[in-house]
Amino acid sequence: MPELRKDPIIGRWVIISTERGKRPMDFKREKKEVVGGFCPFCLGNEDKTPPEVFAFRDPLSAPNAPGWKIRVVPNKFPALQIEGELDKRGNGIYDMMRGVGAHEVLIESPDHVKSLAYLPEDHIESIFWALRDRSVDLNKDPRFKYILIFKNWGEEAGASLEHSHIQIIATPIIPKRAMEELGGAKFHFQLKERCIFCDIIKQEMEVGKRVICSNDHFIAIAPYASRFPFETWVLPLDHISAFEKTNTESFSALAEIMKTVLQRIDTVLDDPPYNFIIHTSPCKTPDLEYYHWHIEVIPKLTRVAGFEWGSGFYINPTPPEDAAQNLRDA
Amino acid sequence: MPELRKDPIIGRWVIISTERGKRPMDFKREKKEVVGGFCPFCLGNEDKTPPEVFAFRDPLSAPNAPGWKIRVVPNKFPALQIEGELDKRGNGIYDMMRGVGAHEVLIESPDHVKSLAYLPEDHIESIFWALRDRSVDLNKDPRFKYILIFKNWGEEAGASLEHSHIQIIATPIIPKRAMEELGGAKFHFQLKERCIFCDIIKQEMEVGKRVICSNDHFIAIAPYASRFPFETWVLPLDHISAFEKTNTESFSALAEIMKTVLQRIDTVLDDPPYNFIIHTSPCKTPDLEYYHWHIEVIPKLTRVAGFEWGSGFYINPTPPEDAAQNLRDA
């Protein structure tokens, strides 16, 4: 008998197929070869991107020249544009504003074929430092309400360039999903005087069967009401509401757990396309008692997502307990 | 400058790229050939599906034998199971229930290669009659709260069988998206004493540029805050809250407009994969002043949906005004 499970934060119900659960080999797909060709993110092509806004580079090297380890550049084809005011307007029953915002790309390394999971741990740590730096900086712009940091890996997950990168979008509105999470978490806090994410961490640590791995500062779990097979959440053990407020001493632990999670996903599912998204509190908010930042990693294994974003009704063929066990044992 | 537009019903903001808008030819993909092979939905294979629960067939023919035009059968691999009670339970901070529900498949015709858009209009009308009949019947089960009717066409849209079909899922919960729509529409009604969908229809008819086509009973529009290129909504002109309560005399108009919309999508986008979903009011609700049933048709053209269901933040590269014009002129 399948189970209907409710996400405790936003109240979404998910069907979990517990009987004929799909196993990793059921998701086998044709292996994608690296295509290569001209790449604006590769070493030596620094002049093919807009000028960098941030870089970790050899102190003797010049900006927008070789000698870098990580670069952040404005997206050449931005979804939102940096100049101008919002000019909010009504139009009969409709509302709109100009598409003002920032859209940046973090190039993870000069190496075209290296995936994030296989960069050295200290390099991954530097990537999170760079993301924190950009978050802090974009947070200052009075027009921006939310910093959305996400990664598309693989064409099926929406990556239009092969060279591994992370995107940063600063938006003048709070995205819907963030609003829902904030609302759900606030409601829980009002009822219970507790952070729902802290509650989840406690229960998962007690139960154990959905825990993938953990270290001194973070835990990775397969969430109880996972929408997708092998969906994985990485949460800080300490209650912290915003990504950029993470204790500086725990960045190495963040790099360690993300490397572990991504490598295990790579091993178990044979380098699947995936997305990850940093869920954090809105810009310019004080520390929130009720919200807890985290990263959601979603391997893109099924095509069943067709009607699902239309109905909000998800069918997950892999129980999270099985997914967690596979990833634990990898 | 891109535009940020707000969906007036559920309040979701969407980025519309107005400048370098993508045109139909930008979505060209490899043409999929019909694979064929054994198909449980084809004529003569009636015993390969569970016994039919409904059929339009030759009065002289026997059930589960040839002689049918349209069949509805239980899904052989149901997402929810028909027997048993819900057995709602808590589990620490989590909530669950058994996956009780119905999962049926409407086989649109005996012809393996015929797509819905190219069936005769009276045949399409019969399909909608059959869907209505199943809705009315499933509505009676006290365990069910919502009847979700949807179509996946093409592998990329989640269709696991090539033979054209529609799915019907009766759920013991109201799907999240339906809850949001009902909530948003109710809020609008409380403020304005008007149905928001009726408001949208009025404004779109006045403005004209997002109207695709219409007839005496229905209108097809490209919604103002479309999430996806060529997203199309078909709405009844009369205020009716539930699909199964549609006036019987307007079923032929429904068939006519759906055929027109699907044929034009086929023409403009070269038989793209698509989903459609019937958005209707929950089971066993009286007529609602604030809700208005409709069909949302979503061609699956972009892979950018990667992070989008994770963030609720959509980027649509084709302005709905351009999409409507292309579909109008087809």
Image: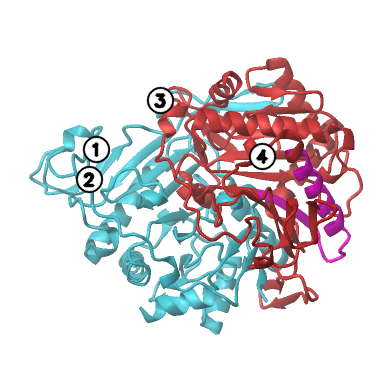
Chain colours: A cyan, B red
Amino acid identity at mark 4: Glu
- How far apart in space, not on screen, are marks 1 and 2 (Cα)? 7 Å
B250 or B90, nearer to the observer: B250
| Residue B11 visible in the shown view | no
**Residue carrying label 4:** B296
Q: In the drawing, does residue B256 fall left or right of residue B327?
A: right
**Residue carrying label 1:** A52
Amino acid identity at mark 3: Glu
Under circle 2, the secondary element is strand
| Residue B70 visible in the shown view | yes
B146 or B121, nearer to the observer: B121
Q: Quadrant of residue B14?
A: top right
Instruction: Identify the magenta region.
Output: B124-150
User: In the image, are marks 1 and 2 on the same chain?
Assistant: yes
Q: Which of marks 2 and 4 is in front?
A: 4
Residue under mark 3: which chain is it in? A
Q: Do the residues labelled 1 and 2 touch (CB within 8 Å)?
A: yes
The disc, 3 or 2, on the residue closer to the chain's N-terminal end is 2
**Residue carrying label 2:** A55
Up/down of B187 relative to A152, above or below: above
